Image: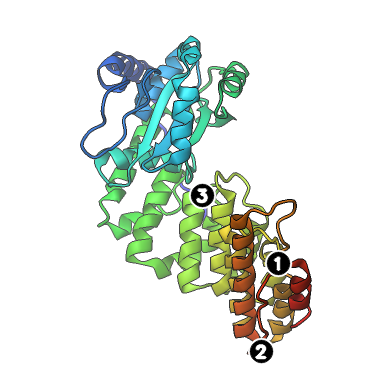
Amino acid sequence: MPMRRLRRGAAVAIFVPMRVALLFAAVVALPIAGHLTAQANDAHSSKAPPAGPPWVTDFAAARAAAIAGNKPIFVYSTKTYCPHCVVMEKGLLADKALAADYDAVVWMYLFQDFSQSDADRAAERVAIRFGISSWPQHFLVDPFTLAKVADTGRDLRSFRAAVHGTKIAPSECTPSVVELAAADALAKKLEKGADVALAREHLQHDDRVVACRALQLLAKKAPKELVAHSESLLVVPNDQIRGIVCDILAEHGDVEAKDVLHDLLRDPGQSENPNVLRIRATKALARCGDASSLPVIEPFATSGHYRNGLTMIAIRSIATIAGRSKKSKADAVAILAKAYPPLPAGTDAATELRMCETLAKGVHDVLSELTGKRVEFPAEYTDASRTVLMQSW
């Protein structure tokens, strides 16, 4: 299905004067509404922007100021209960030396508390636009194209390297100021959650925020309808869109989507959080996959990464597929026998050993259930007992 685009014509014809007017209005408004340094958020938020940088919280205003100054937007995305964000805010963002770079970028503070307040939904729309699904995120955006041009890292040296290595060349705004405002208005309308017909109409919208809001609405109101669109939606380079589709497939299934899920598992390209996206794709394959899915999932099941939730999910998915397909059972057992994790190298840390053994017991339980065979798990998980376990099935 072709992607729909926002209508141009009249909007483009008035772009230049309107852009100037919008830029002027936004820049004038910044000191009043945008600079929130040391100022508490509204009642729906629990976190104020870190003191220091001249933060802006409205994305349209941030873009207008960045266009006017030919400078990138620095987007700092955070949320409630984010320990890694605290580290960054006590480090880079609190560094007094950073003041020398305040004028080099427009400082966009993007905070989500998941309250579904107007402010939280506005922040979520920006997060969807840039595929943010893990925190913190810290990157530079070209205000003309809205392309992400650099990750700043979390220290002063990497921040300055990214900022001073980024040159913004004035160009036609894509999307234009008018188009972006229209898309935002349409996304707000879809957020009200009542107009299913409107969601169907805009499911394949060119603007990813509009498409995601349409998808979210249909996922609640008519999830089975989305199965037919799953293959086209899974190739949209946006974590939120692909993640929602994976969740729908995990619940409702569609064998036709398995090949696209295989591709997504192998390479989640352009993902801000590829591990989470792989987890969701693997859960979908547990419902949609067949024997051809086993070798695709195998590297994640046998990785031995006991700290990564993807490992156990991959193990369970293989067993689930084998439970549906007797022909794949022997292959599944052979893969799972290799999933017993090797012991941590060069460490005797009790926590590491305990986590490794927990994964090993998980593999053992899955194999026992799949085969109906009972093999005693050793009192102590060692290299030697691991070898015995792997040979026991």
Q: Position of residue 7 (x, y in %)?
A: 40, 38
Q: Which kind of residue does numbered mark 2 sit on?
A: Lys
Report, in whole angstroms, how far the alpha carbon at label 2 lies from the one at label 1.
Answer: 22 Å
Q: Position of residue 335 (x, y in %)?
A: 73, 73
- For image coordinates 50% across by 30% down, the residue present is 146
Residue that mark 1 sits on: 298
Identify the disc placed on residue 373: 2
Report, in whole angstroms, how far the alpha carbon at label 1 lies from the one at label 3.
Answer: 23 Å
Determine whether, in the image, residue 21 is placed left or right of residue 225: left
Other residues around mark 3 within 10 Å, as few (<14) / some (14–19) / many (≥20): many
The answer to which image quadrant residue 300 occupies is bottom right
Q: Is residue 34 visible?
A: yes
Task: Determine contact: label 3, label 2, CB under 8 Å.
Answer: no
Q: Position of residue 225 (x, y in %)?
A: 41, 67
Q: Which kind of residue does numbered mark 3 sit on?
A: Asp
Q: Is residue 175 above or below residue 329?
A: above
